[in-house]
Amino acid sequence: MTMRKPFLSRRTLLRGAGVGLGLPWLEAMVPVSGFASSADPRPPVRMAMLYIPNGVNGTAWRPEAAGRDFKLSPTLEPLKDLKDKVAVLSNLWNAANEGGDGHYAKEGAILTCTTIRKTSAEDIHNGVSMDQLAAQRVRHLTPIPSLELGVAPVATGVQFSTGYTRVYGSHIAWSSPTTPLAREIDPNAVYQRLFGAASGRNANFAKMDALLLDRVLEDAKRLRAEVGAADRLRLDEYMSVMRGLEERVGRAGNPAARKWTARVPIDPKAAPTGRPKDHGEHVRLMLDMIAVAFQSDATRISTFMFGNAVSDVNFGFIEGVKTAHHEASHHRNDPDKLRQYEIISR
């Protein structure tokens, strides 16, 4: 299938000097060939942003010394076999988040560097996250622009002690100031999506998915006029997340997607079976999905959340821990809680 569209070269764009440099990546800059070829032997550059809720025990996280001869901290010690390939960055700070109170203000802006305002979701406003800025540059090379994963369902409603909508605590990837990207928490569903991209099946079902998505959004809008204020807020949060699915559907139907081939095959028989009840196994499977996505080159950008803000997962299944993650993070310098906090982070 021949794609006929005007092509805008980078050289043409740069003629605009300062004005041109401020433009977003446009489809007209993408060569007609579309997606990358698996024949290219060079390994692609990839990025995964892994987010841990509730922070870490800082004194046990920071390495000793600087430069190549740094000593791994107790929390980072499991990375010892990879030490020569690890760089630990210090002195980073989200200046726009200075003074923001509570978990939600910090988490919602961790990749956007935006000042989050308190809201009940009717005027939700953030920024574009750095993973999505990266995805804008490489989205034309893979069938899936970016992969957003987690292990906990999206929380709805308002966290009344702080006044923030829980949407901010359930997402770190934002495609626009008002659109958090939907996360997938079922490893089997992720695997099927990756297999669909590798086999071309996603393109076949794109039209059907688009019709289903339109119907769901239309039903949600109609229902909004018939429910109370609290439910309207929940529906607003739901729809803001659902909009993140619209691009996925549009991408799957892109004719250029059929030109792409996986770097390695994805075996449909190797799909995970359902969502594990064990927290550790669930986390490992979701990280495996990122590995499969990168190996096949289905995407080059991913985010993963080990939990939502204020995650209260109890880590009593780990030796030496008898408390929940959130409780340990509010340690108040209690030596025993600090010890458990470090073990959870490790």
Image (cartoon, helix red, strand yellow):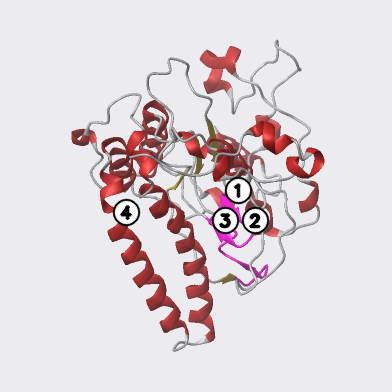
Q: Earlier in the sequence, mark 1 or mark 3?
A: 1
What residue is at 70 percent from the left and 15 percent from the top? 70
Relative placement, left or right, of 267 versus 6 is left
Task: Tell me if label 1 and label 3 are in contact, CB under 8 Å.
Answer: yes
The quarter of the picture where residue 256 lies is top left
Q: Tell me if mark 4 has few (under 14), some (14-19) or many (20+) residues whose alpha carbon lies within 10 angstroms of its own.
A: some
Q: Amino acid at mark 3?
A: Val
Residue 54 has which mark?
1
Q: Is residue 86 above or below residue 151?
A: above
Q: Earlier in the sequence, mark 3 or mark 4?
A: 4
What residue is at 54 percent from the left and 20 percent from the top? 79
Q: Under tag 4, what secondary structure?
A: helix
Relative placement, left or right, of 263 versus 328 is left
Residue at the left extreme of this rendering = 269
Which residue position is annotated with label 3? Answer: 310
Q: Amino acid at mark 4?
A: Ala
The quarter of the picture where residue 271 lies is top left
> Spatial distance from mark 2 to mark 1, Cα to Cα?
7 Å
Q: Earlier in the sequence, mark 2 or mark 3?
A: 2
Give the residues drawn in magenta, as a range: 159-180
Residue 81 makes an appearance in the image: yes
Q: Amino acid at mark 1?
A: Asn
Quadrant the N terminus occupies: top left
Which residue position is annotated with label 4? Answer: 206
> Spatial distance from mark 1 to mark 4, Cα to Cα?
38 Å
Q: Percent x, y for residue 297?
A: 41, 30
Foreground residue, 185 or 251? 251
Q: Amino acid at mark 2?
A: His
Task: Tell me if label 2 and label 1 are in contact, CB under 8 Å.
Answer: yes
> Spatial distance from mark 3 to mark 4, Cα to Cα?
36 Å
